[in-house]
């Protein structure tokens, strides 16, 4: 399927300057190298109804992003406040699901993380519940040069 992908970093996470996540599955902080066994944290839209939170994709859902050659896993939510369902992560982008991948950047300049986020932001293909044998380039996105593979 196609999705609209954006990135978030150590520098602009909630709270800023942290790797905090809302829905830990494999780890207690955002991270990952993008391999099947160590997928990168990805945030998804959600909504709050009463005192219950509903994620657009369940925590633990795995994806493969061929243009990044990375596996990702839902471990975080995108959108803050009492009504995140009114924000773009939940409502989507031009009818497509909006996912937000952790680009890290904790060991890089904030501007490097921002450049990486800009580089990956666009509509791209994604595979939900992928096989474990797709090609990967291991490493956090910012620190490994934020490589993008097309075609």
Image (tube, helix red, strand yellow):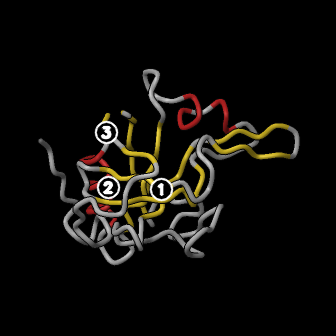
| Camera-nearest residue between 116 and 68 | 68
Looking at the rendering, in which quadrant would you find the N terminus? top left
Q: Residue at x 30, y 38 (%)?
A: 124
Question: In the shown orientation, is residue 150 left or right of residue 32?
Answer: left
The secondary element bearing badge 1 is classed as strand
The secondary element bearing badge 2 is classed as helix
Q: Categorize mark 2 by other alpha carbons within 10 Å: few (<14), some (14-19), many (20+).
A: some
| Marks 3 and 2, the one that precedes in the sequence | 2
Which residue corresponds to mark 1? 62
Q: CA distance from mark 3 to mark 2?
A: 22 Å
Q: Categorize mark 1 by other alpha carbons within 10 Å: few (<14), some (14-19), many (20+).
A: many
| Image position, residue 117 (x, y; %) | 32, 51
| Image position, residue 2 (x, y; %) | 36, 33
- Location of residue 10 by image quarter: bottom left
The secondary element bearing badge 3 is classed as strand
| Marks 3 and 1, the one that precedes in the sequence | 1
Which residue corresponds to mark 2? 114
Q: Residue at x 59, y 63 (%)?
A: 15
Looking at the rendering, in which quadrant would you find the C terminus? top left
Q: Categorize mark 3 by other alpha carbons within 10 Å: few (<14), some (14-19), many (20+).
A: some
Q: CA distance from mark 2 to mark 1?
A: 25 Å
Which residue corresponds to mark 3? 125
Q: Residue at x 30, y 70 (%)?
A: 109
* Disc 3 to disc 1: CB gap under 8 Å: no
Residue lying furthest right: 50
Residue lying furthest left: 151
The label nearer to you, 2 versus 1, is 1
Question: In the shown orientation, is residue 87 left or right of residue 144?
Answer: right
What number of labels is visible? 3
- Location of residue 76 by image quarter: bottom right
| Marks 2 and 1, the one that precedes in the sequence | 1
């Amino acid at each position: 399927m196609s999705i609209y992908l954006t990135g978030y970093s150590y520098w602009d996470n909630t709270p800023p300057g942290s790797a905090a996540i809302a829905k830990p599955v494999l780890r207690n902080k955002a991270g990952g190298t993008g391999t099947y066994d160590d997928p990168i944290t990805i945030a998804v839209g959600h909504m709050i109804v009463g005192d219950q939170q509903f994620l657009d994709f369940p925590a633990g859902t795995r994806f493969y992003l061929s243009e990044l050659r990375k596996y990702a896993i839902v471990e975080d939510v995108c959108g803050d406040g009492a009504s995140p369902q009114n924000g773009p992560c939940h409502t989507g982008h031009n009818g497509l699901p909006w996912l937000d991948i952790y680009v890290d950047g904790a060991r890089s300049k904030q501007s490097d993380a921002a450049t990486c986020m800009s580089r990956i932001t666009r509509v791209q293909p994604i595979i939900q519940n992928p096989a474990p044998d797709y090609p990967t380039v291991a490493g956090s996105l910012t620190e490994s040069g934020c490589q993008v593979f097309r075609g």
